[in-house]
Amino acid sequence: MNAPLPKNRSAPAFDVARIREDFPILKLKVHDQPLVYLDNAATSQMPQQVIDRLVRYQTTQHANIHRAVHYLSETATAEYADARRKLQKFIHAREDREVIFTSGTTDSINLVMHAYGRKFIGAGDEIILTTLEHHSNIVPWQMLAEERGAKIRVVPINDDGELLIDEYEKLFNEHTRFVGVTHVSNALGSINPVKRMIAFAHERGVPVLVDGAQAAPHMPIDVVDLDCDFYAFSGHKQCGPTGIGILYGKAALLERMQPFKGGGDMILSVTFEKTTYSTIPHKFEAGTPPIAAAIGFGAAVDYLSAIGMDRIAAHELELLNHATEQMQGLSGVRIVGNARSKAAVLSFVIDGIHPHDVGTLLNQEGVAVRTGHHCAQPVMQRYGIPATSRASFAFYNSLSEVDALIAGIRKVQKVFA
Amino acid sequence: MADPRTLYQEVILDHNRKPRNYGVLEHPSHHAEGVNPLCGDHITVALDVAGETVAGIAFQGESCAICKASASMMTAAIKGKTRAEAEILIQEFLDMATGKRDLGQLSHIGRLTVFAGVRELPMRVKCAILPWHTLHAAFHSVASVSTEADADPMPAPIGNG
């Protein structure tokens, strides 16, 4: 059940109208207008298939896992393990034990900071991050750097929002111990050349964590091909529930790391003299995990895989190109972030109109966008602006929704004319 | 559901376009700075208090239309008032914007009722009240204030992602 459909080589046309039928929330009206949901970089909506899976788990399969010998516990344990294998396949990891369930990307990064960073990074060591990082891939490393006397070096970007790879390479020296880089910028949409950056770091023996929160929902991910040491992303940004995410880590690295949280489920044996920790991934999953959310996450990646991540990426590129072209035709509107390789995120500013006024007035047209600094204040500082408006697309968005956004922006400009 | 167009009405748009008392005072007796770091609203309010009367008032800053219009209309309303009258108006405006009191319970608010609609937009309340908190801080010579945590009925960051 829920097996992904075989990949269709001669894929039929991408049927957005058919896909939208799967999402009950997309039928909502906001201010008497059809909802145009363009805040997918913040969180995505959930298809009926995932909702049904959560209901089925909760109504017929729920018990605590890894505990009892009774029917429900065995069922829940098997379904939870199955969800882990679905995630493993989704990112093409070699082994399912390399997939650790966390509460989300932020939790995954904090796990690496505590379990790897606090063991292997010390005084005088250097951590390389980039200007494009979300706060969740900055703050944990600042906390570590402060605690350990380590130093953070930052890769700059050009005016288009692309990382300066020459500058990245120049940051390496004998003190470099770790690299954290986002695969896709949540504020600008830039797709970073992480494979090349990882290869460069590995030539110098430096491990790399990739924040995949904005990449995994939108393109095929192959962690073996990337050769990343860690890859983190969240369920709720790709049709799954909130409160669940994963950390992928290479088995050899995970085994050398110290546990992050202590508790039940992460031990082999406990006496007051000594506790022996369990094997990976359980070593990093203390306590009762969000079982339903993990199973829902598994159903979500099944749903995405059945459509095909390559087809999702192609449709979203069409949305981005259409939106970019339309927005470039609007006077007084400037797109922030014009990377040559870009995911379907469109950050923009309108002359003389603050993003928060834009967001409030677009909402009146039923159009949901995000306004603010997008938890990426270093990016805003780079462009000398406090905030942008951001439209971020998902595979269930249509070209006519792009047109609704553009019409909405014209109306906002008219109010302020 | 609230219609934000009732908030973005002509008087507010006009004050946003042509803010009154925008600029600096030569020798202010009081001044304060107000910042909402999460949305980037940033304004300063300067006062020239002669005896008990606000003889001069000016503001400056970068902000959304709601914040700027609120500051502009605030300065127009406050100029020439006594400090005690100003404090009453500050309290009435905060109570109106946060929905603590109905319009019928407010006797000094006058034209500032155009901001009443902001109570229906929880994420925007802090934009409207920032100038008033900053004015209050200026009277009490508090250097810097923010309205993101205390007066926002949804005291949370703008969000994730």
Image (cartoon, coloured by chain):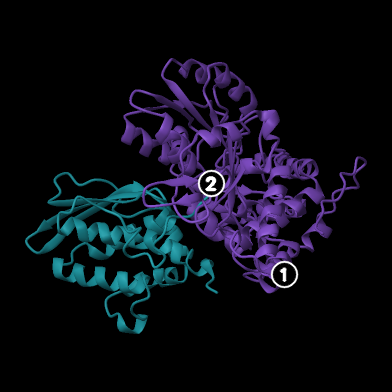
Q: Is residue A218 visible?
A: no
* Quadrant in the rendering for residue B79: bottom left
Question: Which of the chains is cyan?
Answer: B
Front one among A39 and B132: A39
**Horizontal arrangement in the rendering, residue A19 relative to residue A156 (left or right):** right
Q: Which residue is mark 2?
A: A278
Q: Which residue is mark 1?
A: A56
Q: Position of residue A58 (x, y in %)?
A: 66, 70
Mark 2 packing: few (<14 Cα in 10 Å), some, or many (20+)? some
Report the residue at 34% width, 60% height from top.
B149
Front one among A105 and B81: A105
Quadrant of the frame with the N terminus of chain A: bottom right
Image height of A143 relative to B159, above or below: above
Q: Residue furthest right?
A: A10
Report the residue at 14% width, 66% height from top.
B83
**Horizontal arrangement in the rendering, residue A92 relative to residue B4 (left or right):** right
Report the residue at 71% width, 51% height from top.
A402
